[in-house]
Amino acid sequence: MSAVIWVVLGVVLIAAEMLLNAFIIIFFGIAAVIVGILLELGMPETNGLPYVVFGVLSVALLVLLRSRFQSWFKGGSSRAERDDDFLGRDAVVESGFDAASPDRGKVTYRGASWDARTTTGPFTRGAYVRITDRDSSTLIVNAVKG
């Protein structure tokens, strides 16, 4: 295969990555472009060398750079950023948190009903509690101080 075909193949693979968003194909595309450039610079096409270089480069780029590129392009979000809408906010006790189940109940937050846990119960229905953490779809609440 000529250098131009390798570069075109690489560009097509990179474009396919934009459509599929698997974040794997891009490394094959980059490897193909590099092989095309190496061929243009004089790398021999004998004994399947371009295919070997393509395979080694693809795997190396995938293993070494995927996690770094993924955080750059897709963005990383810490748990604290995801929970900004919850932490430190007040919710209203709907049910539970009574003598029968002092550590579990339901609260209302922003018009929605949530399962909740606490270590500072029991609470009465209608009491305000503070959201201190979140475990999946369960809010962790404590008594509102002051």
Image (cartoon, rainbow, N blue to C red):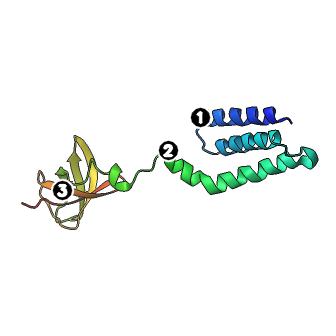
Q: Quadrant of residue 118?
A: bottom left
Between disc 3 and disc 1, the foreground one is 1
**Which residue was labeled with disc 1?**
18
Q: Which mark is residue 7?
A: none
C-alpha distance separating marks 2 and 3: 32 Å
Q: CA distance from mark 1 to mark 2?
A: 12 Å
Task: Provide the residue designation for mark 3.
Answer: 130
Q: Is residue 18 left or right of residue 51?
A: left
Q: Which mark is residue 74?
A: 2
44 vs 18, nearest the viewer: 44
Q: Earlier in the sequence, mark 3 or mark 1?
A: 1
Q: Left or right: where does residue 10 sit relative to residue 108?
A: right
Nearer the N terminus, badge 1 or badge 2? 1
Tell me, yes or no, whether the two marked residues, 1 and 2, touch with CB atoms within 8 Å: no
Local packing at callout 3 (Cα closer than 10 Å; few below 14, some 14-19, many 20+) is some
Residue type (three-letter) at the residue carrying disc 1: Met
* Badge 2: residue crowd in 10 Å (few <14, some 14–19, many ≥20): few
